[in-house]
Image (cartoon, rainbow, N blue to C red):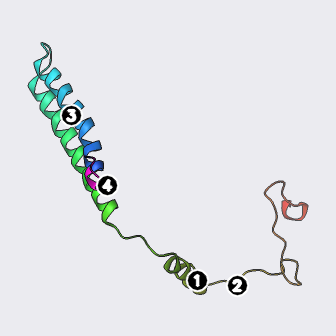
Amino acid sequence: MRDTNPLRRAFARLLRPAGLLVLFLTEVLLAEGGSLSAAVALAATAAAGSALLVCSVISARCASPVPRTRVRTAIRDREQRTAFLPQRDPDARGRTRPRAPGYALLTAAA
């Protein structure tokens, strides 16, 4: 019988690399040149990384999706709070033209 729980399947997928890490750690522990402190440090790092990965997967699965209307409303609210008006006519009288960086103007070079 196949398991249909997506969280359980994700956890099972995470256990496969953990099993490989356990096999690797036993190889490091049983190797002639390997030291015990290096194996313990590697095991602690792998355990911390695995715990962080499991916590992030569980929290990502449990978070409720944000409805699209809320995203649209947030964008609209941010637009209303902006402190400038869009330039509808950049060539209007009194507006200076933006210049591209390049050579200095001859009047400003003196």
According to the picture, the residue beneath numbered tag 3 turns out to be 19
Image coordinates for residue 12, horizontal then vertical, percent: 25, 44
Frontmost of labels 1 and 4 is 4
Please give the name of the residue rendered at 54% of the width and 83% of the height, measured from the top-left corner.
Answer: 73
Q: Is residue 38 left or right of residue 10?
A: left
According to the picture, the residue beneath numbered tag 1 turns out to be 76
Amino acid tagged 1: Arg
Give the mark nearest the N terminus, 1 or 4. 4
Task: Find the distance from the CA under tag 2 to the CA under tag 4.
Answer: 48 Å
Q: Is residue 34 left or right of residue 73?
A: left
Task: Find the distance from the CA under tag 1 to the CA under tag 2.
Answer: 14 Å
Frontmost of labels 4 and 3 is 4
Frontmost of labels 1 and 2 is 1
Q: Residues within 10 Å of mark 4 (few under 14, many from 20)?
A: few
Give the mark nearest the N terminus, 1 or 2. 1
Disc number at residue 85? Answer: 2
Disc number at residue 90? Answer: none
Please give the name of the residue rendered at 26% of the width and 37% of the height, measured from the top-left corner.
Answer: 16
- Residue 92 vertical position relative to residue 37 in the rendered view, above or below: below
Give the mark nearest the N terminus, 4 or 3. 4
Task: Find the distance from the CA under tag 3 to the CA under tag 2.
Answer: 59 Å
Frontmost of labels 3 and 1 is 3
Which region is colored magenta? 2-8
Judged from the image, the secondary structure of the residue bearing numbered disc 4 is helix
